[in-house]
Amino acid sequence: MGRGLHNGSGSKRRNALDGLLGGSILGAALSVRTAHAATPLDYLTAFGTRADGILPLTYGTLAISCLVMLLIAGLLGWALLRGRGAARMEDPRALAVARSGDGLPWIYIGVGVSTVVLFGAAAWTMVVLSTVARPAVKPKLTIEITARQWWWGVRYLSPDHERTFTTANEIHIPVGEPVAFKLASADVIHSFWVPALGGKTDVIPGQTNTTWLQARVPGTYRGQCSEYCGQQHAHMGFVVVAQARQDFDDWYRRQLEPAPPPTGDLVEAQATFAGKCGLCHAVRGTLIGGRLGPDLSHLKSRATLAAGTLPNNPGYRGAWIADPQHIKPGAKMPRLDISGPELARVQTYLDTLD
Ligand code: CUA
């Protein structure tokens, strides 16, 4: 292998250099720029106080890494060109080990520079970590997140039990205020991540981790589980909706409202829903209180289904209920033995949960 490299042709060497210089650095820079415009999980733009604190560190370490890459590539290229003219060694085993301290200064310089840069980056990281560890003011709102394969339970906590409620996969927060999160897992290790608002926090079974987020700009921010947690890890998304305090209060009040008592055809529709879905799902204000799946109170107010996998509209709701395993293989929601008329009645009932 080493022989092959040494005897490599000039064009091979050029390809290697192209790969180092063009492929890695330029390519990375370009992909960063396009990713910036195209992806909702872009972490190079911050819209929240916690992310604001981390962003300079991200760019700083990125710049340091690029500089080191350039430096190494440059030195490597220089060494390759310099070595070209050297006389071919008769016997490689006769390499003099103790030559006049020719290259030693380079080693001292390299070790010195690396040590300073690495310690500097480590110190900077620790300072940033401690500054973003907690918000400037104590959060008034605490949300308990329960990560499960493969969705997010969201519980709004309040000292007043009447003001506590549960929802799923969509977190609303008031803009400009810090919000505390308690993170628990019901099964395996997950990771809670809203890149535009802050860094990742692991969600670990058997312990409660905490984090906080504060949105600076109103908007809908994509969140994603960022710790591989099984087959549908990639389909374990959520959204954070940051809205003005008044809009948030209105949304909160609406979420607290129980489902209206069914009348007319809805009585049968609710009974079908209770029979087919009630073992796993809950609807506030009814006797339907399953705890295995997402709480479906006010389901229609949410933007997505199946943890950010599908848009939430009647067509996708029907497709999801009819065969969730086709859309999200391995998901805990089984394919139900449900007839066409039963599915229609379940749909009719879900349509009232707005
Ligand atoms: Cu949950 Cu990955």
Image: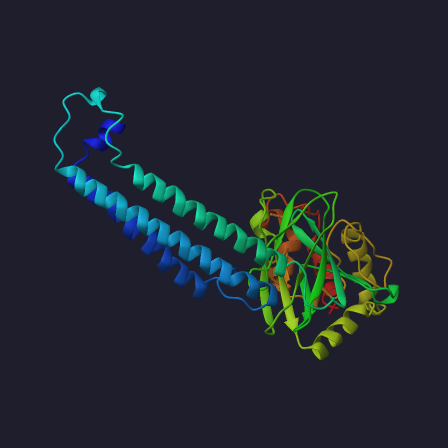
Asked if residue 2 is positioned above or below residue 275 in the image, the reply reads: above
Judge whether residue 309 can be spotted in this image: no
In front of the other: 273 or 183? 183
Q: In which quarter of the image is residue 353?
A: bottom right
Residue 284 vs residue 183, the one in the foreground: 183
Colouring of the image: rainbow
Q: What residue is rendered at 57% in x and 64% in y?
A: 53
**The N terminus, quarter of image:** top left
Instruction: Give residue 342's position: percent from left, percent from top.
Output: 73, 56
For this rendering, which residue is in front, 16 or 293? 16
Q: How many labels does the image show?
A: 0
For residue 146, side relative to residue 112 (left or right): right
Indicate the position of residue 29 as horizontal and vertical percent values: 36, 58
Q: Where is residue 295 in the image (x, y as percent from the top left)?
A: 75, 58
Q: In this view, does 229 lie above or below 241?
A: above
Q: Which residue is drawn at 81% across and 69% down?
A: 256
- Quarter of the rendering containing residue 253: bottom right
Return the residue found at the far front: 100
Decide: is 15 above or below 143: above
x, y percentage for residue 336?
Answer: 70, 47
Question: Quick check: can you spot residue 39?
Answer: yes
User: Most extreme residue toward the bottom, as rendered?
Assistant: 246
Left or right of residue 42: residue 272? right
For residue 281, side relative to residue 325 (left or right): right
Image quarter hosting the C terminus: bottom right
Q: Please tell me which residue is depicted at 75% across the width and 76% down the height of the picture.
A: 250
